[in-house]
Amino acid sequence: MKITAQEEYGLRCLLQVAQLTLKDELASLENIAKAEHITPDYAAKLLSTLRQADFIESVRGKSGGYRLKRLPEKIYLDEVIRSLSGELFESQSCQQFTGNDLKCIHISCCSIRSVWLSISQILFALLKQITLKDLLTKEDVLTKYIKKELAINI
């Protein structure tokens, strides 16, 4: 699986907002873009997506900015990733890979589709157990948590 730039930077922007929200501060567009080394236009696009998904809210005015709409422990990674990019395996994927035909010749007996669907379900089941609060901890702590609590071998 390849992580898209939108997923990576969208999640990083959300973490920037979360860190400041926990300090009871607002995150400005300019500061988020600068911290993540992305353009303000790209940061604005990502923040707009996150706002539409109800993870953050914007506060207007000279000293305005962004803050979380929910507590970090109530925001799960599966929701965030889905809002930024959709499902890992879309049911319409079979229509994209039809070869020279209009319809996939394997549609009635495809064993590959079940693999992609299973991987997607496993990944989102894992992401459903990790919160934004978890990501605010140190990497080695989170890795230990994943290994122990989720029984995943990394």
Image: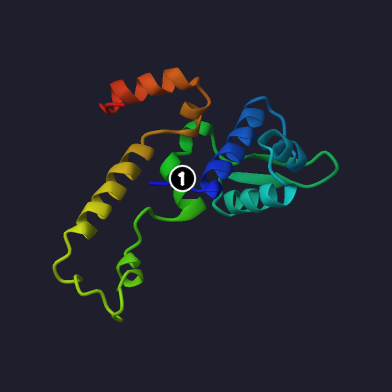
Q: Along the line of sight, which residue is nearer the eye, 25 or 49?
A: 49
**Residue lying furthest bottom:** 102
In the image, what residue occupies the spot 46% across and 47% down?
81
Coloring scheme of the render? rainbow
In the image, what residue occupies the spot 32% across and 72% down?
95
Figure quadrant of the C terminus: top left
**Residue lying furthest right:** 62
Residues packed near mark 1 inside 10 Å, few (<14), some (14 to 19) or many (20 plus)? few
In the image, what residue occupies the spot 65% across and 46% down?
57
The kind of secondary structure element at disc 1 is loop
111 lies above or below 38: below
Q: Quadrant of residue 129?
A: top left
Q: Is residue 81 left or right of residue 45?
A: left
Label 1 belongs to which residue?
Answer: 3
* Residue 62 picture location, percent across and down: 86, 42
* Residue 110 picture location, percent across and down: 17, 64
Q: Is residue 71 left or right of residue 95?
A: right
* Residue 42 picture location, percent across and down: 67, 50
Q: Along the line of sight, which residue is nearer the eye, 108 or 83?
A: 108
* Residue 152 picture location, percent across and down: 27, 28
Q: Is residue 36 left or right of residue 118?
A: right
Q: Quadrant of residue 123?
A: top left
Name the kind of residue labelled 1 in the image.
Ile
75 lies above or below 135: below
In the image, what residue occupies the spot 67% across and 29% down?
20
Q: Is residue 82 left or right of residue 153?
A: right
